[in-house]
Amino acid sequence: MTTRTLGRTPPLLLPSPLNRARNLLTSYTFLKFIKALLTIFFVTSLTFFIVHLMPGNPIDVYIQDLQNQQGMSYSDARDQAASLFQLDFNQPMYLQYFEYLGNLLQGNLGLSFRSTGTPVSKIIFTFLPWTVFSVGTSLIISFTLGILLGMVVAYRRNGVLDNVLSAIASVLSAIPNYLIAIIVISLLGVQTGILPYTRMRGSLSPGIQVGFTADFIGDIFFHAFMPMLVYVLTTLGTWMLFMKSSTVSTLEEDYVTVARARGLKDARIATSYVGRNAALPLFTQLAISIGFVVGGSIVIEQLFAYEGVGKLLFSSIQARDYAVMQGVFLIITIAVVGSNLLADLLYSRLDPRIRVKGTE
Amino acid sequence: MQILNILKLLTRNKVGLVGLIGLTLFVLLVLLGPLFIPLDDEAHVTQIYQPPSAQHWLGTDRQGRDTWSHIVYGGKDILYIALVAGAISTSIAVVGGALAALIGGVLDTVIMTLSDIVLTVPRFPILAVLAAVVRFDNPLLLAVLIGVLAWPPLLRAIRAQVLSLRERDYIEAARALDLGTRHIIAREILPNLMSYILISLIFAMTAAIYEQVGLIFLGLAPLSGQNWGVMINYAYGAGAIWQKDSIYYIMSPVLAIALFQLLLVSTARSLEEIFNPRLRTGI
């Protein structure tokens, strides 16, 4: 596959403005960027139409609730719903849709209608940092640890360490993360009392001031410890096994044999020749796993009463607060799509073969 | 038969054999167990949260009912949703992947772009959001929605496989004989893809179990009746996780799901080891 792409000489192009424009339009980065925007647009539209067009959609339900519970007339109820959802019912659906998109482009996510009048973006930004902190830190820890352990067991294939660690890794990566969370609470908290699980609930102890102080940093790690433990435990196995098989196949490459024949030190071969190349495919996986872990945080944050976007999404679903729900979902989507884009671009920098293939 | 050959190969792998036996036992218990074991559905207030005993193998729940009988009855829905969702996503993946690889051109670009988009949609959150609008009290609806969102990674794997199969001599021979795309897919390519399809199906099932139990646990998929996810939901709602004596009650469904997932994953991993020569030479 590579020989074919490398063997073909690119057609000689004169640097005219037209060609430059064509180069931009077919460049790998540009195509990936367009695809990311397309995905966000697609998901946003999908949620808009789910909320607005489905039979029994939230707006109809809200109008009915107002009529039944507060005895409003249909037109009054509709007016109130219109101001709440920031909609104009006299406009056709497609105009409402464009207005919604226009508001989004200006960063306006609408108003929450449980805590009336609060902008959705403001609510999201009080919850978002906790998820970014706990999920981000755990992923960095488990990614680094997984790469190291994966390389170690790949070098000691079929040894005792390999067998034990690989078995543990496959067990941990197979069990759903919320079940691991239940087991952690039950075994480390309730049954043995190793972790003070009741004090660890929430994301910050009352009375702690936000700031760059030892108290604050210690406290956020104290509260994030259990969710982070669960994220690390459930993702570590995947990284380790992935890195193991990737290292094993890299070890068979000719350039590793050549490096050995040249008498290079083992440590140098392991870091510059094997490790670097074996870790490459894991980066795309990292992006996919960000989406998965953030999605899973809905259940995990609920279990540990951790005040992140996952818990916010769940509480907005329970409260039928569709504005918040749509907003959180949009933020999660942007995060996932953005990290995928980042991984693609990073990967194409690290491995130029991808870029060549992409523009083919 | 292709499938039988695959299973025969699987029994030669230690982990694969354990996985296969374990899965068979689980499926037998779930399908045939209810015929022999009566469901204990009456409250016995004197026997709340009993530890395991000869009479109650897994102890009793908060109403004094036998947990073991609920475990036996609780697997059918989980298995059903996992199978239907897995079958839907695998079918989309096989048909789409094979068409993209064989016909190529614009169709390939369209299918791959679509799969890139669906791949990045956060699956669990979108199911949770959908649960706010659609009521997931029908197992079939839940299975279809899970399946419709799950196909992209499988489709990519199948497409890559078909692309490599396409270059083989016997496919070229079939093309030269002008046997038609349908014949080539059904007779020449599909049989050689069987192991991959089986692996994809198993992984799709594990994802479906993860998603459905997560939704049920949060109460977003209000399935009624006996179901391991519903059991965890009830146990958690009753505060069984916070008490010392109720550990058997909450742990029974948790471990049932964990063990089932583990068996599925180890079977799929062994299949990968057998059919992926690169991994095989490595291990």
Image (spheres, rainbow, N blue to C red):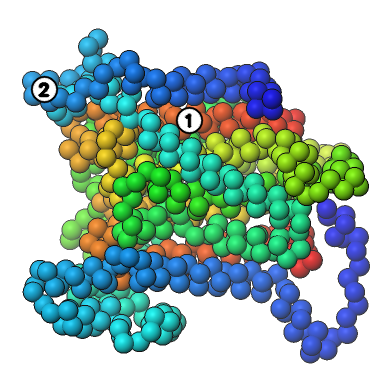
Quarter of the image with the N terminus of chain B in it: top right
The one of B180 and A327 positioned closer to us in this rendering: B180
Q: Is residue B252 left or right of residue A76?
A: right
- Residue B69 in which image quadrant: top left
Residue A241, picture quadrant: top right
**Location of residue A68 in the rendering, given as x and y in whole percent from the top left corner:** 12, 69
Label 1: which residue? B262
Residue B187 appears in the figure? yes
Question: For the residue labelled by badge 2, is the local secondary structure a helix, a strand or a loop?
Answer: loop
Q: Could you tell whether B135 is left or right of A232 in the image?
A: left
Q: Position of residue B73 (x, y in %)?
A: 32, 27
B48 over A26 or under it: above or below: above
Q: Is residue A47 above or below residue B70?
A: below
Residues at discs 1 and 2 both on one chain: yes
**Which residue appears at 24% of the width and 9% of the height?**
B54
Tags 1 and 2 in contact by the CB under 8 Å rule?
Answer: no
C-alpha span from label 1 to label 2: 34 Å
Q: For the residue labelled by badge 1, is the local secondary structure a helix, a strand or a loop?
A: helix
Q: Residue at x 34, y 46 (%)?
A: B138
Tell me if B270 is positioned left or right of A92 in this view.
right
Viewer-proximal residue, A249 or B253?
B253
Name the residue tied to disc 2.
Answer: B44
Q: Which mark is residue A26?
A: none
Q: Nearer the viewer, residue A333 or B41?
A: B41
Q: Report the amino acid beneath label 2.
A: His
Q: Nearer the viewer, residue B110 or A309?
A: B110
